[in-house]
Structure formats: structure tokens, C-alpha cells
Image: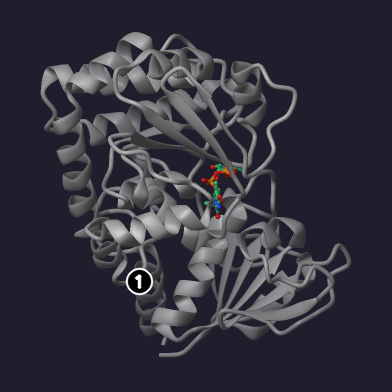
Amino acid sequence: MKATWDIFCSVVDNYGDIGVTWRLARQLVAEHEQGVRLWVDDLQAFARLCPQADLAAERQWQHGVEVRHWPAEWQPVEAADVVIEAFACHLPPVYVAAMAAKGQVLWLNLEYLSAEDWVGGCHGLPSLQASGLAKYFFFPGFSRDTGGLLREAGLLARRQAFQTDPEARRAFLAELGVQLQPGARLISLFAYENAALAGWLDALAAGATPTQLLVPQGRILADLQAWLKLDELAVGGSWRRGNVQVHVLPFVRQEQYDLLLWSCDFNAVRGEDSFVRAQWAGRPLLWHIYEQDEHAHWDKLQAFLDRYRQGLSPAADAALAGLWRAWNAGEGMADSWSACLQSWPELSEHAEHWCTEQAAQSDLAATLVLFYRNWISCAA
Ligand code: TRH
């Protein structure tokens, strides 16, 4: 059943809001043949993920998605069949009135990702709004009672084919200006400013195995620059300190970022979307969680760790939890990194196992489409 969808994205900061909605919009078009308009209030942020985007266009088509600039002065349009307000952004009142006038519009608030237990109980619940319309809360998540995670069809097969093709990996990295050093461990680094970075890099620099650290342009660069004792870090540049070779990369398009994660032995990621993509990479990861008021992010971090660590031996479990806590607290990483290295084969196997387990659940786009089908058949 082809329906029209309006997805509203207000860019708070960073790239997670637009990263998730842009990925979802493309998937609804490509795999479910839905008609999707993506309303974005910040086309600059969109253009980081979709470099061919036209910054001046009020309306443009990208990958079959109608991308609309969400203007400060809203111009009335007809409401879609399904309306997603991403991450509790506020819909224009005139648009809400258009939804009420149209009738039979499914209104969803797509929530931030969390592994906390309460999420399953709240997923899919309606809340009556002043307009008389019901708004449903849609939660992505890691358990079957949630909406699942964004995962495109065939993603894992593509990932596995890439990871078993050394030439594909070599060619991709060469495109980014990175020559693989024999025997080196490859680590990607995408994080917010982090006081723990220097301690971790010291440990890597002193390690027996050489490390190639691949760092796309972003907020961590100032800490990296300080550790390298440089005045500037130019994109495309490469520097060595001890046993670490640092490569500063451009911020690549989303599809290439997947290849980067698939190429690495270990991925440091952040926020929401890169965090999920690193899980699909099937390799051990380190999560820099987005900091929230009143330290609410610590509960979220713990909730994910509680799920993710199930099945690990006590040693691997303690090593991983210690590393993640130190990274997020900005503390010393040397001991927990060394403990992780000792449990490396187990952590690697576990990452693949976790990925397979998560992939056995329905993906977020599919659960959204199903939710709409069920809703419309009840409403009919
Ligand atoms: O940019 P983020 O820190 O976004 C955050 C989080 O989503 C957080 O939950 C939210 O509250 C806050 O924004 C407002 O991290 P995230 O979610 O990983 O988004 C980054 C996006 O950028 C993701 O889609 C991957 C993409 N990306 C690229 O396309 N190319 C790159 O080179 C890199 C490093 C990332």
C-alpha cells in the first residue's frame, strides 16, 4: 500500500537528527515504495550527509525523497497520510490543523534510541492532543517490543562481502588516502571532545601492535591536535607518534562511513546513528554517548551495556564496561584498554553475535510501515 509520509526534522546540533531521518526517508522510498517528503530546517547539516544537496532549494529530489526546506514562515501544504515528528520537534500549528482537517492521518513521534527497559512498555502508545488527534510514541530499540533499529535490506550481506574482500577494503582506504600498513590494527574515531583521548592514545602509542587511527573531521580534532602537539590538523594529513599513525579524513557521505566502519578492527562512535552503524559492522566498538542534563545519559549507557554484555566472560565483561565508562567519564583508559586487548578474540566474536541477534528483529522502517497498515485497518 503506497502512502504519503511527511518526516519533520529539526536539527538540534550535530548530525544525528538529520542522519536518522535521512536514512529512514531513503529506506521508506527504496524498500517500501512510499512517497516521502523530508522537511529539514537546516539544509547545511543535510548537505554534510548528502553533498550533492542544493543549499538554496526550497524543494529538491534526492534518492527519490522529496527534500523540503522547513521554513521559519510555514506555507500551508496538504498533510500526508503518515506524519513523523522526529525527536519531539514541534510541528507547525497550521500543519497540525491541516492534519485534523484531512482526517485519518497517523501522527507519530519518533523517539531517541534507548536500551532502557521502560521503552518497550511505552512503544506505540497514543496520547490525545489538543487538536483532537492522537499522537503515537514510536521507540527504536533493541528488544522485540520496540520499533527496532534502522537497517537496510541486504546490509549485512554487503558488509560480509566487503569484509571478506581485502582488495575492496584496500581500494576504499586508498581512495581516502590511507595506505594499509602490514600488521596494523585499524581504528576509526568519531567522538565528542573527550579528556580521555590522550590517555588512550598514549596506550596505543606505547603498544606492541601498530595502530592506524582514522579520524573523520569533527569535534574530537582539537583533542587529537593537542595530543600530537601540532598547531593545525589538515584534512588528508597523516602524523605518527610512537606506534600510532593518525590519518585525518574528510567527513564522508553516509554510505562511505559504513565502509569505513566495516574496514576497521575497532570503531569509536557517538550519538545514535553511528552507534547503530558500528553494531552492524560486527566489530568491537566504543560508544561516546550524547551527554544529557542531570546525567540521564549514564542510565542509558548502563542499560545498553546490560544488554550488550550478556554472554561475555567476567573478564571480557569487566574490560568492556571499564573501557566504556572511562571513555564517557573522561578518565584513564590504559588499564581497561589493556584488559580489552586480552579479551580481543572474545570481544570480536561477541560483536558479530550481537549483530546477528539484532538483525533477527524487524528493522525500524518495516515496523513503521506495519504499524501504519495495522492502524489504517483498525481505523477503516
Ligand atoms: O552527530 P551525532 O553526535 O548526533 C547526535 C546524536 O544523534 C544524539 O542522540 C542527538 O541527541 C544529537 O545528535 C542532537 O552522532 P550520530 O547520531 O552518530 O550522527 C552522525 C551522523 O553522521 C550519522 O548518520 C553518521 C554520519 N557520518 C557520516 O555520514 N560521515 C562521517 O564521516 C561521519 C563521521 C559520520
Q: Is residue 168 visible?
A: yes
How is colour applied across the structure in the image? one colour
For label 1, the SS is helix
| Front-most of residues 248 and 306 | 248
Q: Is residue 367 left or right of residue 6?
A: left
The residue that label 1 is drawn on is 366
Q: Could you tell me which quadrant the C terminus lies in?
A: bottom left
| Front-most of residues 318 and 84 | 318
Query: Which amino acid type is shown beneath numbered disc 1?
Result: Ala
Q: Is residue 39 left or right of residue 311?
A: right
Residue 119, position as x, y percentages in the image: 37, 44
Q: Is 285 located above or below residue 298 in the figure? A: below
Residue 98, position as x, y percentages in the image: 72, 78
Residue appearing at x 68%, y 61% in the figure:
46
Quarter residue 185 falls in: top left
Quarter residue 33 falls in: bottom left
Residue appearing at x 77%, y 67% in the figure:
70
| Front-most of residues 41 and 180 | 180
Residue appearing at x 46%, y 19% in the figure:
201
Q: Is 70 located above or below residue 321 in the figure? A: below
Q: Could you tell me which quadrant the N terminus lies in?
A: bottom left
Q: Is 65 located above or below residue 315 in the figure? A: below
Mark 1 neighbour class, 10 Å CA radius: few under 14, some 14 to 19, many 20 or more? many
Please state the total of marks drawn on the protein image: 1
Disc 1 residue lies near ligand 1 with CB under 8 A: no
Residue 342, position as x, y percentages in the image: 18, 19
Residue 8, position as x, y percentages in the image: 65, 65
Q: Is residue 285 left or right of residue 73?
A: left
Residue appearing at x 75%, y 23% in the figure:
231
